Amino acid sequence: KEKNRKGYVPLYNRFEQFYSRYVYRRIRDCWNRPICSVPGAEVVLKDRITNDYGWTFEYTGLEKKCLNLGSYNYLGFAEASGPCAEESIESIKKYACSLCSTRHELGTSPIHLELEETTARFLGVEAAITFGMGFATNALNLPCILSPGCLVISDEKNHASLILGLRLSGATIRVFKHNNMKDLEKVLRNAVVQGQPKTHVPWKKILIVAEGVYSMEGSIVHLPEVIALKKKYKAYLFLDEAHSVGAMGPRGRGVVDYFGVNPHDVDVLMGTFTKSFGSAGGYIAGSKELVDYFRVNSHAACYASSMSPPVAQQIITSMRIIMGEDGTHEGQKRVMQLARNTRYFRRRLHQMGVIIYGNEDSPVVPLLVYMFSKIGAVVRTLVSKKIAAVGVGFPATPLMEGRIRFCLSAAHTKEQLDNVLDILEDIAERLGLKYSQLPRYKG
Ligand code: PMP
C-alpha cells in the first residue's frame, strides 16, 4: 500500500481525491449555494463569484431570486405561512424545538403518537413508527431485520441509505438490473427452487429491496410484478417510498396507490417526510407486529433523539390536508396539479428533442448531458438565467451519464414552467444537448 512522506497510508483513495479536489472544486459554485428563502416555487440564492478559474469563491452579498426546480417540495408544503406553518409555530410554543430525549425515555409527546397514527391511516396499514431522519430510517433499520445468512436482492439504482443499511446488516447482497423484472426473477430463481433453498446453506430469509420512484433515474418501480415475484418465490419486500409518497397516485398515497395494489402486500413500507410533506424524518409502516418489533429492536428508535415537535406537526398538518381532513379539496388539488405539471414538463422536453429518463408520471426529471464538463456549464447557465436545478455526476451516476435533475412541484405555475422550458430550449441548442446533436459512434 502506498504511504505518504510521514509513513501513513492515505486516508482516502486517490480516485475520489482526484474528483473532489481537482474536478468538483473547479465547479463547486454549482452546489452548496446557501438559500435565503423557503424552497418554494421560487428560491432566493446567495450569489457567488468565482475567482481564479474556480479555485476560490466568495459571496457577493447579493441575493438572486430563481425559479426553483431543485428542491423536493413536490406538493408545495414547504411554506412559511398557511396552516402547516401556523400549527408548527403553535407546537414550538408548547414543546420548543426538541424534547432532548429518545422515544423510550422522555422523547414521546402526543404529537409523536398522533403522527404515527396519522401516517398509518394515510398509508392504509395497521401501524407506523417514525424517526428523525430519513437516511437513518434505512441505514439503521435494515440491519434490524437482516443478519448474516439472509439474502437481499437489491435494485442496482437503490439509494445510498439502503446500500449502507444492507452492508451494515452483514446479509448476502445480490443486485438486479435496474427495474428489470426478468433479471430480478433470474436472481430469485438462482437462489430458490420451488420455494426451497437450493444451496446446502439455506437462506434465513430473502428480502427484495426497491424504491417507489428512483431519485436519479425518475423511473417508477414495476410494483405489481415485484409483488407477484416476491409471492412466487416466498420472499419479502422492503419498499422505499421517499420520492413517491405524497407525489404519486390519485390520492397521493405513493406507488401503492398509483398501481392500486394492496398495501399489505408490501411487507415493509418505508418513506421520508423531507419531500412531499415539506418537513424532515422518515417512517416504517406495515403490520402492528412489524412496527412493534422495530420499536424495541431498532437502534434508531432506542438510541436516537426523537423527531423535533414542530417538524412532526408540519407532517401531521400536511398529511391531513392531502387526506382532505381539513374539510377542503386543497390536498387533492395539489396532487392533481403536480401530476399535470409533470406530464406537461416531460412532454415539452420530449418535443424539444433532449434526452430525459424516467416514467411520464414521475416528478423527478433527469435531463441527460452525458459529459461531466457539461454539468457545470448547464447549471451555471441556468443560474445566470435565474433557474435553480441540481447537477448530478459521478459517483451518484455512472461517469459518463452526467445529468441535470429537475424536480417538479404543485407550486409551479404553467407560466413558470414555460419560462424554464424556453430557456432550456436555448441552452440545449447552444450546449448540444439535443439528441440530434449528440456524437454518433460507429461500430
Ligand atoms: N431514500 C431515498 C430513496 C432518498 O432519495 C433519500 C434522500 N433523498 C433518502 C432515503 C434519505 O432521506 P432524507 O433525505 O429524508 O434523510
Image (cartoon, helix red, strand yellow):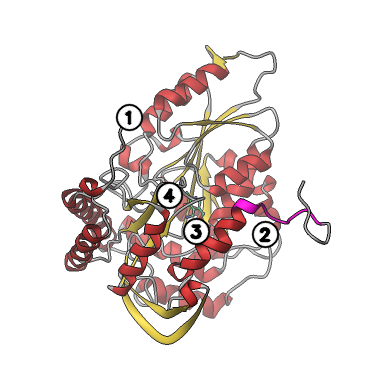
Tell me if I can see residue 72 in this picture. no
Asked if residue 54 can be seen in this view, the reply is yes
Question: How many marks are shown on the rendered structure?
Answer: 4
The amino acid sitting under disc 1 is Gly
Q: Position of residue 253 (x, y in %)?
A: 36, 48
Q: Which residue is mark 3?
A: 115
Q: Is residue 10 magenta?
A: yes
> Residue type at mark 2?
Ala
**Does residue 328 show up magenta in the picture?**
no
Q: What kind of element bears circle 4?
A: helix
Q: Label 1: how many residues lie within 10 Å, few (<14), some (14-19) or many (20+)?
A: few
Image coordinates for residue 64, horizontal then vertical, percent: 35, 80
Give the numbered dot on residue 443: 1
Q: Which mark is residue 69?
A: none
Left or right position of 141 against 9: left
Q: Check the image and report above or below for 185 versus 359.
A: above
The disc, 1 or 2, on the residue closer to the chain's N-terminal end is 2
Depth check, front residue: 255 or 117: 255
Counting residues from the start of the chain, the first of labels 2 and 3 encountered is: 3
- Which residues lie in the magenta part? 8-15
Query: Mark 2, residues whose alpha carbon is within 10 Å: few (<14), some, or many (≥20)?
Result: some
Mark in front: 2 vs 3:
2
Where does label 4 land, which residue? Answer: 121
**Residue type at numbered disc 3:** Leu
Q: Are marks 1 and 2 in contact (CB under 8 Å)?
A: no
